[in-house]
Amino acid sequence: MRTTGLRRSLAGLAVLAAVGGCTVNTGDTQGKRPSGHISASAGRLSGADGKNAGGPGTAKGGDGTSGSAGKDDAAPAEVLWSRGDRGDDIRRAQARLHQVAWLITPPTGTYDARTVAAVKGFQGKRGLPRTGELDAVTWQRLRGMTHEPAAWELYPYGGQPAAKPDPRCMTGRVLCVSKTSRTLRWMIDGRTVSEMDVRFGSQYTPTREGVFSVYFKSRHHVSTIYHTSMPYAMFFSGGQAVHYSSDFAARGYYGASHGCVNVRDESKVSALFAQVRTGDKVVVYW
């Protein structure tokens, strides 16, 4: 009887020692993340990194999140972009915010104070944390409500990098006009003298493509058809001309011409007008 009782006591002590001495596995040499283990002596849930949540009654799971004991708080969404970030991704995000009318100003490619305010507004309207940062959840919601921005939406007031010159622009004096990048290069013997933003006609009054030449210049021209001002007009195909447009300067690509090549920068087109001669080549291409 004494032998049996002694065996039972020793077995009980072994069990207590095994439980009371439980430690956290900090991971193997292969970099695998083990599951969390309960430390009976501490009464806390420790994560796979072997660190406790930090205080009595708190918990920390394998993903590093913390919360009240007995509750699993969701991890915060990954932040993709925030204030101060720059680049094409920011420009596309701003264009999408503009589509849903949360950002009124055109895309700039810089995550500025206005972008922060727009993101906060979008998040608050949809019950998301108003952080002002574009996290993965906010970005997913925004993408689901918008379409992929077109080039003109990314640069509604110009500023898009000029496209590579058409081969026909590489010799002589040429007004090299790209419909793809919506830019005009003034070129002499393959060298770019100046660049400027331009816009074209709508689908109902398209700007003609091809190779032309400047046949008439008019500094203070007024359209006889539409009765609108066309300063610094350089005509190259019928009634179509390269000229300054105050409407383009004010509205950007939210408007269109009646077929002419509009320039938004008056100082640049003024300098161009002074340099271009009758007979200079005009190339309009995609």
Image: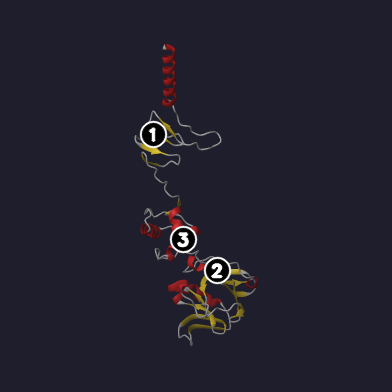
Of all residues, the one furthest to the front in this rendering is 1
Say what amino acid the circle numbered 1 marks. Arg
Say what amino acid the circle numbered 2 marks. Ser
User: Which residue is labeled 1 in the image?
Assistant: 44
Question: Disc 1 to disc 3, how far (Cα)?
Answer: 41 Å
Lower sequence index among marks 1 and 2: 1
Residue 181, disc: 2
Between tags 1 and 2, which lies in front? 1
Choose between 196 and 44: the one closer to the eye. Answer: 44
Whether label 3 touches label 2, CB < 8 Å: no
Lower sequence index among marks 3 and 2: 3
User: Which residue is labeled 3 in the image?
Assistant: 144
Choose between 93 and 183: the one closer to the eye. Answer: 93
Choose between 206 and 219: the one closer to the eye. Answer: 206
Lower sequence index among marks 1 and 3: 1
Of all residues, the one furthest to the top in this rendering is 2
Q: Is residue 135 in view from this perspective?
A: no
Say what amino acid the circle numbered 3 marks. Gly
Q: How is the image coloured?
A: secondary structure
The answer to whether residue 278 is above or below residue 168 is below
Whether label 1 touches label 2, CB < 8 Å: no
Position of the N terminus, as image quadrant, is: top left
Image coordinates of residue 221 in percent, x first then y, are 48, 84
In terms of image quadrants, where is residue 6?
A: top left
Question: Disc 3 to disc 2, how far (Cα)?
Answer: 27 Å
